[in-house]
Structures are given as C-alpha cells and as structure tokens.
C-alpha cells in the first residue's frame, strides 16, 4: 500500500483523494475527514507539564471514543530518568508508544523526517517520510491502518516534532 499527502490531502496510488486533515493554526487539534464524510479528531494533550512523558496524543471519533492513543518516549541517551535533565537543552523525544484498538505499536523517528511504525513483535507496519522541499508525505506499508488513522499517525509525527522544537522565553 502506498499513499502520498500533499497540502494535507491524502491520495492513494491512483491519485484519488481519500482523506483530508483540517488543522488548527497551532496543529495541536485537527479534524480528519474521509472522502465519504467520516470525521475523526486528533489532539495533543500537554497536561500542563514540560515532561513529555506526561503528554498524550489522541485520535477519537465523533462520539469521543478513543481510536488511538500515544505516549511520547525520550531517546535512550536522553532519558531524564536514567541520565538526569540536561542543563543546556531539552531531552530529545524520538518515539511513541501507540495503542490502536487494543494493539500496541512503536513509532520511531529513524532520521529526520522519517518515521517507522512497528507492531509489538517488531514487525514493520508503516513507513512515513516527509519531504520538506516538496512539502509532501509518503506512506508505505501494510494495510494495518485505515486512511483516517494514517492521517492520525501523520498528526502524531507532527506532534513529536513539536515536542523537540526549541522554546525561547
């Protein structure tokens, strides 16, 4: 399965428009609409803490049922529990622990801006790559996620990058 996303519109291999992300100005809340009118939402929940482990990313349907939930994870050499908080920068967040319909997945940044999603047995499920020059996402993998959830995973990747942006006060 291959998809591409241009201007927040997800296209299939035949270039048919199958889903659309309507994001807020901050991208912290997004509505995702399929071509047949189904709508879900993606949201970044900070829980008023700078520690990324207290944050949560959620995709839910119109009835507020959670379809997917993710918790950010620090990279191994930056984990503040093991190494303490760095004095000159925030620790790097490079992964997510995701639960979709009771199944567990791991999303990992494998190089900016490339991400992989693997199931809990370590099997590759989905690859996501962003081209800053072309401003497009490419999606390759199995049919494990619906197009709406693929858009949700792209939102999760954007939230992950938001975790690592520098904050100047």
Image (cartoon, helix red, strand yellow):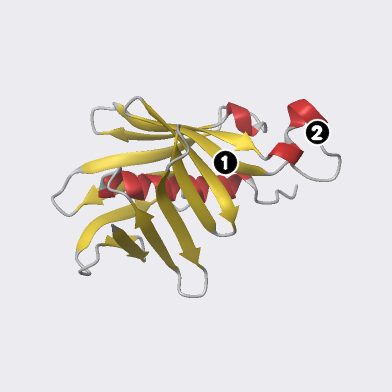
Camera-side residue of 131 and 103? 103
Find residue 153 and report its horizontal and vertical position in percent.
40, 46
Image quadrant of residue 94?
Answer: top right
Q: Is residue 128 left or right of residue 150?
A: right
Q: Is residue 141 above or below residue 4?
A: above
- Label 1 secondary element: strand
| In the foreground, 107 or 122 | 122
* x and y, in percent, of residue 5 in the image: 35, 63
Badge 2 element: loop
Identify the residue at horizontal 69%, vertical 44% (top origin): 92
- Residue 48 visible, this angle: no
Q: Is residue 147 visible?
A: yes
Height in image: 87 above or below 81?
Answer: below
Residue under circle 2? 85
What residue did someone put label 1 on? Answer: 95
Q: Position of residue 137 (x, y in %)?
A: 41, 63
Left or right: where does residue 97 sit relative to residue 152?
right
For image coordinates 37% across by 45% down, the residue present is 152
Whether the residues at callouts 1 and 2 have beta carbons within 8 Å, the answer is no
Q: Residue furthest left?
A: 36
Residue at x-position 45% and y-position 70%: 135
Give the side of residue 58 with respect to residue 159, left or right. Answer: left
Q: Residue at x 48, y 63 (%)?
A: 130
1 or 2: tag closer to the N-terminus: 2
Specify few, some or many for label 2: CA neighbours under 10 Å numbering under 14, 14-19, or 20 or more. few
Question: In this rendering, which labeled residue sits more in front, label 1 or label 2?
Answer: 1
- Estimate how packed mark 1 is, as few (under 14), some (14 to 19) or many (20 or more) residues with alpha carbons within 10 Å: many
Q: Quadrant of the N terminus?
A: bottom left
Residue 154 numbered tag: none
């Amino acid at each position: 399965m291959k998809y591409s996303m241009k201007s927040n519109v997800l296209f299939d291999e035949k270039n048919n428009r199958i889903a659309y992300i309507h994001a807020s100005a901050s991208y912290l809340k997004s509505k995702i609409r399929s071509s047949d009118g189904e709508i879900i939402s993606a949201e970044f929940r900070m829980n008023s803490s700078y520690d990324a482990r207290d944050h949560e990313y959620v995709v839910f349907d119109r009835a507020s049922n959670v379809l997917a939930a993710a918790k950010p994870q620090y990279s191994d050499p930056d984990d503040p529990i093991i190494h303490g908080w760095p004095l000159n920068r925030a620790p790097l967040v490079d992964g997510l622990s995701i639960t979709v319909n009771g199944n567990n997945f791991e999303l990992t940044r494998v190089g900016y801006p490339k991400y992989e999603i693997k199931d809990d047995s370590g099997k590759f499920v989905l690859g996501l790559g962003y081209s800053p020059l072309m401003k497009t996402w490419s999606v390759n993998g199995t049919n494990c996620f619906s197009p709406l959830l693929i858009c949700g995973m792209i939102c999760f990747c954007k939230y992950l990058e938001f975790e690592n942006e520098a904050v100047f006060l």
